[in-house]
Image (spheres, coloured by chain):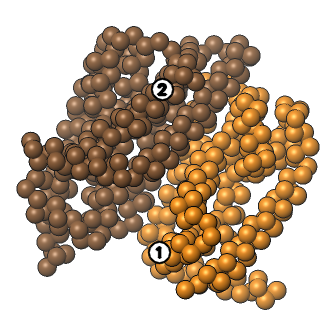
Amino acid sequence: MHTVKLYGRFLIVYMRSQLEYRFSFFGDVFVNMLTFVSLYLGFWVLFQTFPSMDGWGFWEVLFLNNLNLMTYATCSMFLWGPMIQLENTVRTGEFDNFLVRPYPPLLILVFRQFGQMSIYTVRSFINYPISIYVQSIQLLLTFLIPYAIVNYYPASLFFGKEERSALFYFFPVISVAVGALLFLLACKIFSRGVARYDSSGS
Amino acid sequence: MRLYCQIMLNAVQSGTTYRFHTFITTANRLVALLVQFFLWTALYAGASALSVPITQVSLDEMITYAVFSTMISMIVANENIETLSQKIQTGNIVTYLIRPIGLFRSLLFETLGTKAFAALFEIIPILVVGYLFFSPAELPLSHLLGFLIALFNGFMVYFLLTFLVGMSSFWYLRIFHLSFVLTHLINFFSGIVIPIWFFPKALYAVTSWLPFDLIYYHPLAILLGKADESQTLFAFAKGAAWIAVLAAASAIAWMAAKRKVVVQGG
């Protein structure tokens, strides 16, 4: 309860600081809305010519995208900002940390680069129903980088489309569990990172 | 001339320094191309299943469109917005004022220098992979000259648009607003993913009054042989007109900015 109250206070302070620069605040809002408008317009134009996207209609694909955007918005509201900042503080302030680790520092950097690539680029796969891809990509999006859990499986359950990819017919049901599991995993990695950071502090 | 060669050479060298960055960019574009390949395949399959004829273009041609659209995005890419906004905000723009050649030409030749590097490590890989995996349609070579002219126009239009957005940093600090607006306008109106021939009539009319389709749609339509002679000539004329307008706007912006930068520096 205390946490919720505290969070509320933080939100109010944050909103005030944002509204201080009113013009740029509304600029931010406008630009964000434009992102969605251009996305929707693109789908609308496509469905003017093409009747279906692997059995999905215009509104269904829009729903799929909105699920993706909604989870992204929820995530960025709580986590995205702090995580980006975390990376910056690590990079600018404490680059030495890479050098004293038992891993080759270059390898860590390379992994991180690839990680970022997978975050930004692989996400574009789930703008469309993943049943349009070959099975290996579907597997990748389900097990290795489970983005499909974010929108495809819930939406396919919602529209009764799960028979289209019979391989994973049980996935809509367990997507909540997968989400919880990944969240726990992320928390674990984070606390491990914090522990490691303390011990290697200069 | 020597000076311009040196600027281009510097850009080539800095390109080779960020080899890993180049690799990641190319990988990203390949992934985006892969997504498009499956998207168009699914859309065409859906149309033929419901026997809806797609008269404008065949699937093979659409995949060719996607491959060459990716190639164009590499050719026209530049760093104008980042470079200008960063130099203006830090005040480093002053180094351009003391150079013997103008800001615009410095940036242009820097960009051209990066292209020499990009040709080897970005453009050729994309074309090789595109042809190996996606088997695009055969292209008649007779349209090559028209394509190159339209591509030059598109390059200049994009260069001038980004130059103008970058220059706006003199007056407006949150440059990413304008940069985002430009990106979204281009994403939708340029034909980078969805060709203009799929647009409904009203949107088609709007698009023809905007400069963005000069960057992707017109060069690609000419390359695929989808533009007849009059449409090709119209595209050239439209390109020339927009380049003139945007160049004039850039010159005015730079003159106004020079006056402003003195005030800031004082």
Apparent side of residue A123 relative to residue A170 in the rendered image (left or right): left
Callout 2: few (<14), some (14-19), or many (20+) C-alpha neighbours within 10 Å? few
Chain rendered orange:
A
Apparent side of residue B238 relative to residue B72 in the rendered image (left or right): left
Q: Is residue A66 visible?
A: yes
Name above or below for residue B206 compared with residue B62. Answer: below
Q: Amino acid at mark 1?
A: Thr
Q: Which residue is mark 2?
A: B128
Apparent side of residue B77 relative to residue B132 in the rendered image (left or right): left
Identify the secondary structure beneath mark 2: helix
Quarter of the rendering containing residue A78: bottom right
Q: Residue A68, percent across and down?
A: 70, 51
Whether residues under marks 1 and 2 lie with C-beta atoms below 8 angstroms apart, the answer is no
Q: Which residue is mark 1?
A: A92
Give the Cα distance between marks 1 and 2.
Answer: 39 Å
Q: Are discs 1 and 2 located on one and the same chain?
A: no
Residue found at x 54% / y 37%? B30
